[in-house]
Amino acid sequence: MPKVRFEPTGRTVESVREGETLAEITARAGVPLDSVCGGKGTCGRCRVIITSEVAPITDEERELIPAKDLERGVRLACRTKVDRDLVAEVPEEFARAGQLILEKADVDVDLDPLLRRVQVKVFPPSIHFPVGDYERLERALDGIVPSGKLFVPLRVLRSLSELLRAHDEISILLRGNEVIDLTAPGPKSDNGVAIDIGTTTIVAYLMDLSSGKEICVRSEMNPQIGHGDDVISRITFAMERPDGGAILQSLVIECVNNLIDACCSSAGISTKEVYEVVAVGNTAMHHLLLGLDASPLAHAPYVPVVTDAIDTKSVDLGINVLPEGYVHTLPNIAGFVGADHVAVLMASLRGESDRPRLVVDIGTNGEISLVCSKGIASTSCAAGPAFEGANLSFGMRGTEGAIDHLYISDDMDVAYSTIGKAKPRGLCGSGVLDAVAEMFRTGILDSSGRIVEELHSPRILVRNGESRFVIATEKESAIGEPIVITQNDILQIQYAKAAMYVGATVLMERMGVIRDSLDRIHLAGAFGNYADPRSARMIGLLPDIPLEKIEGIGNAAGTGAKMALLNRRVRDEASVLAEKIEYVELAAQPGFEDKFYSALFFPHLDTSLFPAVCSETGRG
Amino acid sequence: MPKVRFEPTGRTVESVREGETLAEITARAGVPLDSVCGGKGTCGRCRVIITSEVAPITDEERELIPAKDLERGVRLACRTKVDRDLVAEVPEEFARAGQLILEKADVDVDLDPLLRRVQVKVFPPSIHFPVGDYERLERALDGIVPSGKLFVPLRVLRSLSELLRAHDEISILLRGNEVIDLTAPGPKSDNGVAIDIGTTTIVAYLMDLSSGKEICVRSEMNPQIGHGDDVISRITFAMERPDGGAILQSLVIECVNNLIDACCSSAGISTKEVYEVVAVGNTAMHHLLLGLDASPLAHAPYVPVVTDAIDTKSVDLGINVLPEGYVHTLPNIAGFVGADHVAVLMASLRGESDRPRLVVDIGTNGEISLVCSKGIASTSCAAGPAFEGANLSFGMRGTEGAIDHLYISDDMDVAYSTIGKAKPRGLCGSGVLDAVAEMFRTGILDSSGRIVEELHSPRILVRNGESRFVIATEKESAIGEPIVITQNDILQIQYAKAAMYVGATVLMERMGVIRDSLDRIHLAGAFGNYADPRSARMIGLLPDIPLEKIEGIGNAAGTGAKMALLNRRVRDEASVLAEKIEYVELAAQPGFEDKFYSALFFPHLDTSLFPAVCSETGRG
């Protein structure tokens, strides 16, 4: 059985399975190695330096790894079968870095959780009242639980007898009509956890169910990322291996358990004092969490196994909280509009009027809903990962050294800020957005998206026939080369913004809402909250409405999950909402291609749709 | 770690736990060794011959083992701590023999099981009908399951997607509104198991749920018997050891699994084709099966943890049938009137009028119900184990060599039959009953129960000041000594029959039913079915009614369990029945002691209550 030792930590993995690749081992061993393609050998990110003897270099490696790196032993972990003992090192620049995570999820909802704690006196039995323990408990709960509806699971029932012999009062934890815990009387700590399972990030909020207050929040990268950055690569992984789904499920469950553990440790409570978990995620994350078959999500007609809300005993799912407690997942809307978007909608709608608004969550898969008095229509847009900093020449996640905002002066000087105030290593989503918006505003891009080479600026270069614009010079950059935006990068942004814009406007048409009557655009999620609304409007990502109407609403998926944890009516409302939403399949809309083509322009082929942008740029 | 080898089989137990006795090891290793007291060192039954070196003889052993046996190495297994390697042999006469088991449980009920199989077409999804798998299944079941009531457990839901992609129709196994299995379309074998968990015997009936027919029946001794013959010794065992309850639970569950396995093998089906188990037993057996605390049953006011019917997932209980299938236990009535008596009542009442009848199950703990137009009253009588052949000088279970019936001629000759036509080894319950009845009828006993020594028969002996009557002479006997009934044995029978009679008549008084209006006495269980009604009436065990009104109804507990398996309304009826039954605590009745004293006489102190007996015996 071969072994792998990772340097410089000396960490050794001994239980290498037959045919396993080095990438699979890093994913399993929690060694933070980058990967975008999920082990297909196409992204070239999972680079390691192998210092021991190893199999010959593959064609994929020859193509994806520069010669000078090949010479110093750089290989692709996903192409390296571990057929002998190996010593490997992850070069710093290919280690998966920690990411800025949007944890802020304010919640303002009446406290009325599904869980109730009651303390009741249970009459002792006697020879003249020889009534069973359970039946006396039932009588003690008369008026609290409707007659005939009480349910006490066997595992809880097993503790009843001893408790009743030791105490005349007992403390009962009810979830609806089910008793999920029985304990001695006295003060308790009653807690729940809201979890937002993002494709990239998992955030857990530990909530005090007695006060409704957030006790603490913890987040981690979604460890499934070792098997692909986006949902499709993960579903593919789950489909291609018989145990693929089980591997992804156990990764997310382990991560959730770690986060709950970390929250509880920090708060000084036991994980057994967590009684309920509300989890949201996109439909694929939802299915992988519950161990449902996600493969139908990968091809038309993209139907989920289930859209209804689901309650599962935590013990059945392996979530380490009170074993008889439940994991509640909010309903999904469609294959690409999941429970997280339902949560976003719940957060956005809370206590608000039904004046028309767009609720937008921009990601690799963007979700948009239009809410108005006629109802709610939702759609998903295949925006691609450009706004997450992926698939661009110098795109990166929101980690240290990422350019997150920038400004281009009239003489084409670029002023930028970076995360952690470090030397720049690339551009994250909000940085790319600013770059494109500023290039357009300053005329470096024409409305078709072409880089205007004719400007003859030292910042405009042409390499291998492709134009590029220098954001940070080689001297400024931390990576030994200039950080640029290429013509192809611009195209990726055009695709992404066109998809989002068409999604929004198709919904508006469908519901008969015109731009001027839009009361608000709510932006959920990390990109939406860090992005500059002015830039988003400038490139035509969003309809041209006054900037004060565009509003980041934090991690609204987390907010919605918290709301469902704290108020049971929110769950009913979410189910009603998910049912009444009209899901609009963009690709099936008449004229979709024309609309998409027109939206590829900056800000749009029909400039009359963007009066504010035209007046700002003086173009159109 | 010491080892124990059993001769002559050579079976060796290596994993001896610290402080374990030889009796515990035989129980755990399935070595069939007799025991009545459950390891308390008081019954002297668990005799083994130890041929290796061993600790000194204890006082209990000196008292309970005859000197000549002590000389040949006979010891009590429950008094022998295994502190070194041992070689032990179980003498044939102390091996626990197989017992005649009453398996006959006829059932006549409409076939309407809670389980339904339906085969439905599920509409495929399309881009214009992108509805989730679960939601399409829900629509397919429209009209079969009420709207909004469908429940598909997560484990079943996980199989839905793949099935729907392979088939346009699927076969659905519904239990009420819950889908417990999903399979490809086609013919199926749908089965259930009814189980009667007796203190001594466990019987399993494999039933075809499509036809209602019994496919096969298997029975085994209840393996808990190694920890005590009666419920009180078992509850004591469960209370005295921290893992006592868990040990007893795993023994019964293992036995149930073995029986189900044996039934399925014989029928050529998989255990996964068994979808539902209905189990009945007395309240203690019920609690031990479900892992509930049985200790409150051991002391006043004898309240059960629960009397309601319980449904438990078979997977949660470790019963090896379809994992999502259920184990249903019928309701209990009280601490000493359990689900088995509810089953007996259901079997007795089926399709019958409400003319007054007694339903009697005679055992160590006798259960009696009086059914009449005013309702049902039930009680339990601590009859003691005499009618089960225990605690008598030559009592034994209904195994080979047991005298099961006998007749005493006017010249005091005894004609008897034995089980298996073997040489007699003792008397089982029905034999003891006949012996006492015949002794009374022929004047060997007077009405106070005294053996009339003055008859000067060679069959009447006095040893150590105690009279005894010889049933089988030393020459006839298989055990090298005469088989006798002693004065003390008669007293045990008097206690037992008085308890039963008082139970029956207290219920009759309570409900205002007089002897002449009794339409029927139904006798359930092994003793009730093998006993001669004439003998039972002769000694005053039962009220004096015409013999043709006394009727054995087979293993009625098994019949009732089968009925509940085959017809879901029976379950509702059983719950209604269990709720409306008036439980009468005998010991709390005014005048109970006087009544009991009067009933100690043969047939009764007040002979006017037994006109037929008086006319038959010419006494009274």
Image (tube, coloured by chain):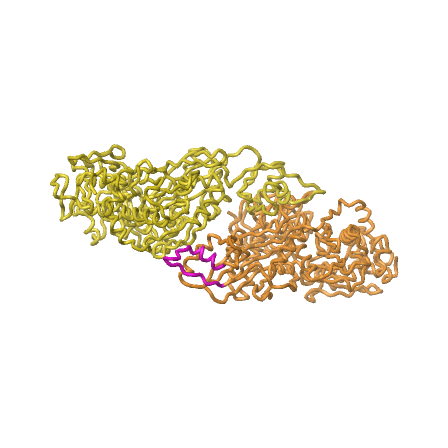
Chain colours: A orange, B yellow
Q: Which quarter of the figure is the C terminus of chain A placed in?
A: bottom right
**Percent position of residue A95, x then y:** 63, 57
Which quadrant of the view contains residue A166?
Answer: bottom left
**Residue B287 magenta-highlighted:** no
Residue A290 in the figure: left or right of residue B281 = right
**Percent position of residue A565, x then y:** 60, 59
Q: Which residues are magenta?
A: A119-141
Residue B516 in the figure: left or right of residue A385 = left
Report if residue B128 is visible in the image: yes
Residue B534 in the figure: left or right of residue A16 = left
Q: Is residue B200 above or below residue A462?
A: above
Residue A513 in the figure: left or right of residue A64 = right
Q: Is residue A106 above or below residue B263?
A: below
Residue in the image at 52% along x and 59% along y: A143
**Residue A137 magenta-highlighted:** yes
**Percent position of residue B555, x then y:** 37, 39
The front one of B78 and B285 is B285
**Percent position of residue A317, x then y:** 54, 52
Q: Is residue A272 above or below residue A59?
A: below
- Total label count? 0
The front one of A545 and A99 is A545
Residue in the image at 46% along x and 49% along y: B310
Report if residue B428 is visible in the image: no
